[in-house]
Amino acid sequence: MTLVSRIQLRGLTRRFGAVTAVDDVWLDIADGEFLVLLGPSGCGKSTLLRMIAGLLPPTEGTLHLGDTDITHQPPQRRDLAMVFQSYALYPHLSVARNIGFPLRARKLPRAQIRAKVAAVAETLDLTALLDRKPRELSGGQRQRVALGRALVRDPGAFLMDEPLSNLDAKLRAGTRAEIAELHRRLGATMVYVTHDQVEAMTMATRIALLDQGRLEQLGTPAEVYDRPASVFAATFLGSPAMNVLDATVLTVDGTLSARAEDIDLPLGIDATMPDRPVRLGVRPEHLTIAPPGEPGIRAVVTGVENLGSEEVAQCRSGTARVAVRGTRPLGVRTGEALTLTARPEHLHLFDVGSGRRLTWQPGAVPAAV
Amino acid sequence: MVSGTFVEAPPLALAGEAGVRPASRETGRSRARRLAPPYLYLLPAVVLLVVWTYQPLAQTFVLSLHSWNLVPSTPMEPVGLANYEQLLSTPELGRSVWRTVVVILGMLPFTVLIPVAVALLTRRVRGRAQGVYRALVFAPMLVAPVAGAAVWQWLLDPSAGAVNRILGTDVNWLNTTGTAQLAIIVITGWHVAGFAVLVVTAGLAGINPDYAAAAKVDGASRGQVTRWVTLPLLSPTLAFLVLMTVLLSAQWTFPLIDTLTQGGPVGSTTNLYYLLWEYGFRSHDAGLAAAAGVLFFAGFIVVAAVLTRLAERLSHHDD
């Protein structure tokens, strides 16, 4: 068994006929890392996980665990544990036999299996359920048995395929904390697939955001949230999603600002450059209501949503929709005209064509637009 | 100073929220119209069952209490339980039951073991080859039993038959007591194995592939996955096949026996069904045949009930 369970994906690609499910993904997952593969359904995240598990051979690329190339090793020899979305608990076996299954496959003596199963059951609070069959368990209990089956054998790394998606909201929050705690305690490498941004933000040490089989962004939750690499990343994370508006960067009195018919936001950069159309992004929580007459985004409130502690004002600015989020009460009413403003550091600019993030580089010679 | 007190919020008055339930005022006719459709849908099937299954069953029972030679002009004579007494006192019945058991045991490899092996192996064949392979396995099922029997008779011919030539033997397969039964079993097995492969394949397709994937990741070898996961999950299908074999083996052999051996030599291939048929249509003793039919019917009900209960216990609710 390798002590260092660093997982490297080198250009992994998987095609199903004409469809490319995973497209040239390079990832270096450090030992002890909690990497979340995040993306909408159909982005290839589960396919990627199945390739890591060895359940699906890659069309191209290689996979390394520690120093060994495991691209062509069968799943049995990869020393990885996996928790399935369906849990895949063997329906004909009791909880104890389900948890002990990986040890039985490794031909451990029976007494040792029993002791290990008992220990794992103890930590997961499953001791009273050891003789039950999976069908006699609740969703949360099944989830814990699936986790127990992964935990029982000290694997090189844990792979989890949307393990919380079948739980109700309250249980999900609790289990989220439990899995994060488990990761801290074991210090094991985890690769976790989800479409739920809350799971990604709360549990990950790094997020790999996938879209249409491609790696869109890789970074800590804070990096991905604060500096989204593209319009896709910007709008995928955050609730409500980041507002993205069409605007043009103009030089006004030696300083740059984003302008459109209803938009006038200074970018806080003292420089000159040729006009450039951009997509302007700003998170709902970064918008504040400015006194009338101030520059900003002119909008009309179309509705106010009460979230309990906060309120979201849905607005319309020209043809675009803009959401504003703040502590309740926001003090606005439907039909009211507002000017919304945001600090320059909270404004994100994206290229109109590629959707990639634009960063200011002082001194660079601007390309003609 | 103003005095006051805290007042508890009153519980919600649900009736006020939901309103009053409308009184049901349904006429008998509209009620009938509402309740009738399911029974109307069932009607054709029920009529067919009654006409073709339950009525003949009742008639058989009535017939078993009479003596009749199948000639329409001769009257049926009520004889009470005499047919049953005669039946139970003949040694032929016991022997034919034993031969039926042998046929069933001999059929099990063809309906369970070989199909499971073939279905598990053909899972790895992909694409068009898989379809071709399965079609080849299923093909014997499509050959009419009597036509198949004729070809086999020719293959088993003691002097010029291909079987003797290939085996280098000189056996009179169909006219020797031991080998005749064997020939009947093998030919019937050849006939139905394809169907059983199809059933097993369907059963395998119904197993969530996540189980095998999980077992592989858990470190189970290919053989362990088959033994510990796939076969246990397939057990309801296997129980179904065993049930089919027990209940229908003797029926499947009938056309072959009638074509190849006519129950011989020396009655060595006369199983329950063939015996029943001989009583009815060779000895023209309709009452005795009917009594035998009723007895077998009762016996198979018991066997079927036991096997069904066993199958239910084996099935795992996969959810």
Image (spheres, coloured by chain):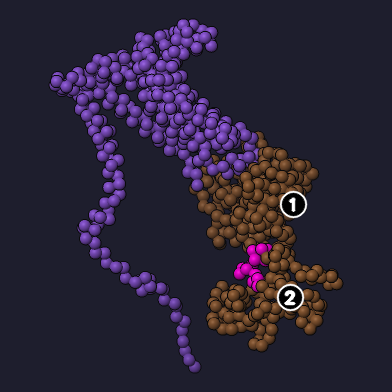
Instruction: State the image quarter where residue A155 is shown.
Output: top right
Label annotation for residue B174: none
Asked if badge 2 and badge 1 are on a common chain, one would say: yes
Residue drawn at the location 73% of the way across and 41% of the way down: A70
**Residue B68: image location, x then y, percent:** 18, 20
Instruction: State the image quarter where residue A214 is shown.
Output: bottom right
Residue drawn at the location 53% of the way across and 33% of the way down: B131
Q: Amino acid at mark 2?
A: Val
**Residue A235: image location, x then y, percent:** 64, 66
Label annotation for residue A26: 1
| Shade of chain A as shown in the rendered figure | brown
Q: Is residue A185 visible?
A: no
| Shade of chain B as shown in the rendered figure | purple
Q: Assess whether mark 1 and mark 2 are in contact (beta carbons under 8 angstroms).
A: no
Q: Which residues are magenta?
A: A232-245
Left or right, residue B17 beside residue A250? left
Check disc 2 and report its element: helix, strand or loop: strand
Residue reaching furthest to the front: A368
Residue drawn at the location 69% of the way across and 80% of the way down: A264
| Residue A115 covered by magenta stretch | no
Label 1: chain letter? A
The vertical placement of B127 against A132, above or below, is: above
Quarter holding the C terminus of chain A is bottom right
Residue carrying label 2: A249
| Residue A236 covered by magenta stretch | yes
Q: Nearer the viewer, residue B202 or A24?
A: A24
Q: Within 10 angstroms of label 1, few (less than 14), some, or many (20 or more) residues?
A: some
